[in-house]
């Protein structure tokens, strides 16, 4: 009978410890910031941005003025969603990822993400998509002025310019 009483207390102690552990872990997740804070994301969040110019062969090329990019049926675009969620269209495929931004210092990091694997309708479109995706991985800063958003690499060189998509 004594053995049963001791095991009952031990079981109650283990359950109480488990409950405390679960409550503490949930509380700590609630207070922890996600990939970026809400105030840091507000400058980017919720707007659809369409690619306007992109770095190609060491020059910033305006898409509408360059025949190589007229092959795209639809311009690449990106949307920064709530809680660090990032999605977009490369000109060929859809992409999804996460991002971390700090609007106070203008830093931005886009994590490698998922990309659909649809066949490009031309080699030029596939090359454009590859350039776009590669440059997104090199973004380390951004600036927003008016309806334009510019991404920069770690050295401060512009990688691409996007314009707010008109509705």
Image: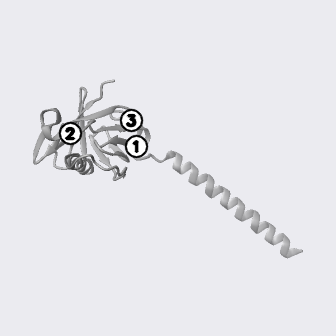
Q: Residue at x 12, y 33 (%)?
A: 65
Q: CA distance from mark 3 to mark 2?
A: 38 Å
Measure the alpha-carbon separation of dots 3 and 1: 12 Å
**Residue 32: x and y, percent?**
47, 48
| Disc nearer the start of the sequence (3/1) | 3
Residue drawn at point x = 18 percent, y = 39 percent: 69
Q: Residues within 10 Å of mark 3 (few under 14, many from 20)?
A: few
Q: Secondary structure at mark 1?
A: helix
* Total numbered circles: 3
Q: Residue furthest front?
A: 121
Mark 2 and 1 residues: CB-CB less than 8 Å, in contact? no
- Judging depth in this view, the residue of 31 and 116 nearest the camera is 116
Q: Nearer the viewer, mark 3 or mark 1?
A: 1
- Nearer the observer, disc 2 or disc 1? 2
Where is mark 3, residue-wise? 39
Q: Residue at x 53, y 50 (%)?
A: 28
Q: Closer to the N terminus: mark 2 or mark 1? A: 2
Residue in front for this viewpoint, 115 or 67: 67
User: What residue is shown with label 2?
Assistant: 71
**Disc 3 to disc 1: CB gap under 8 Å:** no
Relative placement, left or right, of 60 versus 74 is left
How crowded is the residue under tag 2: few (<14 C-alpha within 10 Å), some, or many (20+)? some
Q: Which mark is residue 84?
A: 1
Specify the quadrant of the image occupied by residue 39: top left
Label 2: state its secondary structure.
loop
Residue neighbourhood size for the residue with mark 1, other residues' Cα within 10 Å, grouped as few (<14), some (14–19), many (≥20)? many
Tell me, yes or no, if residue 157 can be seen here: no
Q: Is residue 112 left or right of residue 22?
A: left
């Amino acid at each position: 009978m004594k053995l049963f009483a001791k095991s009952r207390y031990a079981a109650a102690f283990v359950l109480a410890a488990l409950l405390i552990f679960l409550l503490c872990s949930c509380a700590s997740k609630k207070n922890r910031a996600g990939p970026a804070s809400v105030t840091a994301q507000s400058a980017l969040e919720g707007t659809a941005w369409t690619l306007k110019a992109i770095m190609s062969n060491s020059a910033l090329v305006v898409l509408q003025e360059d025949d190589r990019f007229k092959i795209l049926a639809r311009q690449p675009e990106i949307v920064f969603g709530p809680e660090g969620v990032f999605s977009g269209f490369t000109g060929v495929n859809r992409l999804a990822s996460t991002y971390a931004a700090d609007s106070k210092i203008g830093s931005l990091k886009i994590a490698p993400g998922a990309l659909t694997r649809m066949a490009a309708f031309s080699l030029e479109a596939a090359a454009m998509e590859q350039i776009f995706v590669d440059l997104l991985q090199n973004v380390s800063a951004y600036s927003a002025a008016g309806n334009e958003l510019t991404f920069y690499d770690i050295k401060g060189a512009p990688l691409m310019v996007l314009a707010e998509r008109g509705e």
